[in-house]
Amino acid sequence: MYAYSNPGLSGSKPVSRGEARSNLPGLGPAVNVFDLKPTALNVSYSKSAEALVNDSNVIDLKRTTDARRLFELVQLEVSFEKEIGALWTFMRPRGRPSYNPDLLEDFHAWQRGIAAEFKDRPGELDYLLLGSRTDGVFNLGGDLDLFSQLIRKRDRQALIGYGESCVRILHRNMYTLGLPIITIGLAQGDALGGGFESLLSFNVIIAESQAKFGFPETLFGLFPGMGAYSLVARRCGAAFAEEMMLTGRTYSAQEMKDAGLIHMVVEPGQGIAAAREYMERNKRRHIGARAVFEAGRQVMPLSLDELDRIVRVWADACLQLSDRDLKIMRRLVSAQDKLPKAPIAAE
């Protein structure tokens, strides 16, 4: 069986691989986002779900055009719980728990699939949750192995392509894919660098108390260039954003809650239960809560252009790293390789 249901979640039904793929067209070749020119990715994002589904310029992946493929993504485990209108998604990265190119492609497919599936079904989807199946880790951020290769090749265009791919995912998530939903980020483990950046784009962040957070990029001479400054400064001020990035220190979940970056801290192992309780408790208040988050976006809007400009600052900084910085980056890759891997999805 191909299980797209989550253990402990009612209302999600496993289907066989044959059932899931019946009557579906071939995937066709996927486009490598790092081969695209930056200008091809520099498109204005519309907060309309219809625009996300129809805009082939966002990322031209043929597999994203059929919403039924939402449950066949390689590195994302997806299930829909109809009773509470929740789409549960958990990352299962192949290899290191970072945003590798294939995981990014899955996220683009996931976003377009959700928009296609629910844009004409108002009221069915209320909550969109993202967590991780990697023990002790939400996500450790950018693909450092890829970065070191591109830096040694002096490939600025590919670095920008990677960054622009990331910020499009983040920006669409911040604007809830143009759907009337509330997004929830669930950190049952550490969220560092780009992993924390992505988490900050969710409306509600729930963290288990053992999780750690921070931006360690200064260890190898960089900074988090895909949304961190923009998101932290809007919530906590520029001084705190700069302190986080310049010191590179890690923070506890409670420290991040006290700073206003995390909404809820729960005991270890209680993250899924807390997320479910939040969704059930707030079901009747969903419209008002959604409006509060929309008001926040109106008060503190974040443009894709701002994110793109910072990506270019980041790419230029990458190309100035020393051999020593790259050696540190390689050591971090080796350390990440030793971390527990996400369990393989059941067949």
Image (tube, rainbow, N blue to C red):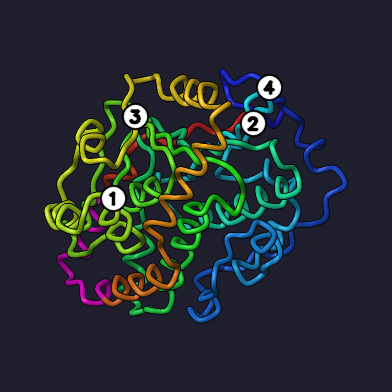
Please tell me the numbered disc located at residue 85: 2
Q: Nearer the viewer, residue 306 or 157?
A: 306
The spot of residue 243 in percent (x, y) is 13, 54
In the rendered structure, which amino acid carries the disc numbered 2? Gly
Residue 235 tag number: 1
| Mark pair 4, 1: CA separation | 36 Å
Seen as rendered, the residue at the extreme right is: 23
| Camera-side mark, 1 or 2 | 1
User: Is there CB contact under 8 Å for labels 1 and 3?
Assistant: no
Residue 163 belongs to magenta span: no
Earlier along the polypeptide chain: callout 1 or callout 2? 2
Name the secondary structure under disc 2. Answer: loop
Please name the predominant secondary structure of the magenta segment in the image.
helix
> What amino acid is labelled 3 in the image?
Met
Q: Earlier in the sequence, mark 3 or mark 4?
A: 4
Q: In the rendered structure, which segment of residues is drawn in magenta?
A: 317-333
Quick one: label 1, few (<14), some, or many (20+) residues within 10 Å? Answer: some
**Residue at the disc numbered 4:** 11
What x and y, as percent, mark residue 244?
17, 51
